Image (cartoon, rainbow, N blue to C red):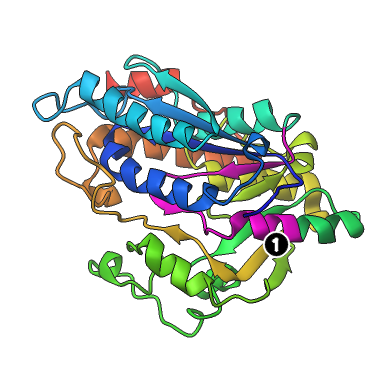
């Protein structure tokens, strides 16, 4: 058991098409939470999104009632552990997505907690996450460091620029970006069981921290200190997608060479970006592993506008696209 000195929120945005994968996510939360002694120090914030502004629900396969029931089943499991759950539903006709949720999560909780933890439906926090954060918190308090990010390590990721975030047991491996990459357990896109993650992390007798001064952010299981958010770092309102990239840009713009991101190199989280149930019940799409080039055309248009906004944020030129512009694109 662990008695927490700090206060936390774990916030997660769940799209309707992630509802089958959400079951695994809830099991991951149980794995993380069941050893917490003072449960009042952790709040779980969940947003279930049934918006059909980009993807449509395939009502031949599932009803709205069944979707909501599956979501609430997960909420009840967490509540039965004794934790407070703040849950909200986003309706079918609303423009509100991942970046909007995380922006609001940061803003709404940064004065209520010490750390904001970004959950993601395809991910597992390590069972040791609170031990890691509490250990780091003792060090940063002593060193008068208050504005920072913490990443748990991942399996092999893309090119060598991501190696600072790779678990020390996976650093020597080569990342092979092909159609079978999501089946390779050594690579970050694939599934890895909670039990295997726990087994790997049990080898860590002491936590090994490193840090970088240029943001390298993978949003899943990211930990943000409240003071970082209070200083103005957040996902800018101009970004309608690409939340982790937006956070990176603002970290650099506002903190410059004072930015610091800690990485726990010997404690692994799981981010199964190609989970086999990542996109279910999407009308006119058969793409359960969520390959980007197989997503519906409306998503592709949405992504193009978001990428354009990223460039406009970087360069400071041209007007940002809004949801109204996306609606016009669809007409």
The residue located at (24%, 48%) in the rendering is 277
Which residue appears farthest toward the bottom when viewing the image? 172
- Region rendered in magenta: 113-135
Q: Residues within 10 Å of mark 1 (few under 14, many from 20)?
A: many
Q: Report which quarter residue 211 is drawn in.
A: bottom right
Q: Name the element at disc 1.
A: strand
Q: Is residue 32 visible?
A: yes
Q: Report which quarter residue 75 is drawn in.
A: top left
Where residue 287 sits: x, y (%)? Answer: 19, 47
Where residue 153 sits: x, y (%)? Answer: 55, 66
Does residue 267 sit above or below 250 in this rendering?
Answer: below
Does residue 52 sit above or below 148 in this rendering?
Answer: above
The residue located at (57%, 52%) in the rendering is 35
Where residue 7 sits: x, y (%)? Answer: 71, 39
Question: In the rendered structure, does residue 118 fall within the stretch colored magenta?
Answer: yes
Question: Which is more toward the observer, 5 or 97?
Answer: 5
Residue 88 left/right relative to 20: right
Q: Report which quarter residue 331 is drawn in.
A: top left
Question: Which is more toward the observer, 231 or 330?
Answer: 231
Q: How many marks?
A: 1
User: Mark 1 = which residue?
Assistant: 262
Does residue 296 sit above or below 51 in this rendering?
Answer: below
Question: In the rendered structure, does residue 231 fall within the stretch colored magenta?
Answer: no
Question: Which is more toward the observer, 311 or 237?
Answer: 237
The residue located at (56%, 79%) in the rendering is 168
């Amino acid at each position: 058991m662990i008695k927490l000195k700090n206060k936390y929120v774990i916030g997660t945005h769940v799209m309707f098409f992630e509802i089958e994968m959400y079951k695994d996510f809830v099991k991951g939360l149980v794995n993380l939470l069941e050893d917490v002694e003072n449960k009042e120090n952790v709040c779980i914030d969940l947003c279930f999104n049934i918006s059909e502004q980009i993807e449509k629900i395939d009502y031949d396969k599932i009803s709205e009632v069944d979707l909501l029931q599956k979501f609430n089943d997960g909420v009840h499991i967490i509540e039965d552990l004794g934790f407070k759950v703040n849950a909200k539903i986003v309706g079918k006709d609303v423009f509100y997505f991942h970046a909007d949720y995380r922006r609001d999560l940061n803003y709404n909780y940064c004065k209520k907690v010490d750390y904001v933890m970004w959950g993601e439906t395809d991910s597992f926090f390590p069972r040791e996450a609170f031990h890691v954060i509490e250990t780091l918190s003792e060090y940063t308090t002593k060193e008068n460091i208050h504005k920072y990010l913490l990443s748990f390590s991942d399996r092999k990721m893309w090119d060598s620029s991501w190696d600072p975030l790779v678990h020390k047991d996976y650093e020597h491996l080569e990342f092979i970006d092909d159609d079978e990459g999501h089946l390779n357990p050594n690579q970050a896109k694939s599934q890895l069981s909670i039990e295997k993650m726990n087994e790997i992390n049990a080898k860590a007798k002491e936590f090994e921290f490193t840090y970088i001064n240029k943001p390298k952010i993978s949003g899943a299981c990211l930990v943000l200190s409240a003071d970082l958010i209070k200083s103005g770092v957040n996902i800018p309102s101009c970004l309608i997608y690409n939340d982790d990239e937006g956070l990176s840009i603002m970290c650099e713009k506002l903190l410059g060479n004072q930015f610091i991101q800690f990485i726990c190199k010997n404690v692994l989280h799981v981010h199964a970006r190609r989970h086999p149930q990542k996109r279910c019940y999407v009308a006119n799409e058969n793409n359960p592993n969520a390959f980007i080039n197989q997503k519906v055309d409306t998503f592709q248009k949405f992504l193009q506008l978001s990428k354009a906004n990223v460039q406009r944020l970087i360069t400071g030129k041209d007007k940002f696209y809004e949801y109204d512009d996306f609606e016009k694109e669809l007409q």
